[in-house]
Image (tube, grey):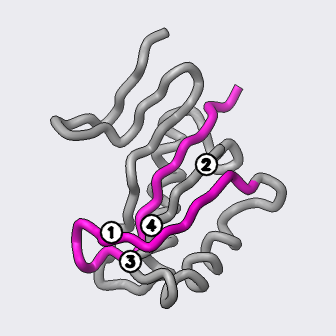
Amino acid sequence: MRTQRLHTDRRMSQIVIHQGTVYLSGQVGESMEAGIEQQTRETLQEIEKLLAEAGSDKEHILSVTIYLKDIERDFGGMNAVWDRWLPEGVAPARATVEAGMCESDILVEMSVIAAQRE
């Protein structure tokens, strides 16, 4: 079966699809001056857009890894946005960790694995 790569440059692809599984690279919001809630909303909007392009949606997310710049400060705010975004009964496997970010203004980054819709 063919592996499909979308939005690819030399170092990475935003989307990789293989055998009905969608892999998204780490996604961040656009408003780097914003707080955790806004950055989380923007990150989730980008994830939704990429999943739709790949033939999936948030109800088909299998796993997500969430990276927070400051887990003690931002865990609650990120979770408040996450809880409003994700429908009841479709929670994926999830890990949330504190991490150094590639740019100092990034507060949250998410990497997603999802199934394509049947």
- List x then y, in percent, for residue 49: 48, 49
Q: Which residue is mark 2?
A: 63
Which disc number belongs to residue 69?
3
Instruction: Give whichever of discs 4 and 1 has the lower sequence position.
Output: 1
- List x then y, in percent, for residue 87: 76, 60
Q: Residues within 10 Å of mark 3 (few under 14, many from 20)?
A: many
Instruction: Give whichever of discs 3 and 2 has the lower sequence position.
Output: 2
Residue at the spot 52% in from the left edge and 57% down from the top edge: 65
Tell me the element at label 2: strand
Residue at the spot 43% in from the left edge and 12% down from the top edge: 2
Tell me the element at label 1: loop
Magenta stretch: includes residue 23: no
Tell me the element at label 4: strand
Q: Residues within 10 Å of mark 1 (few under 14, many from 20)?
A: few
Residue at the spot 46% in from the left edge and 52% down from the top edge: 111
Marks 3 & 1, CB-CB < 8 Å contact: no
Q: Residues within 10 Å of mark 2 (few under 14, many from 20)?
A: some
Quadrant position of the C terminus in the picture: top right
Q: How many marks?
A: 4
Task: Give amino acid for label 1.
Answer: Glu
Marks 4 & 2, CB-CB < 8 Å contact: no
Marks 3 & 4, CB-CB < 8 Å contact: yes
Q: Which residue is mark 4?
A: 67
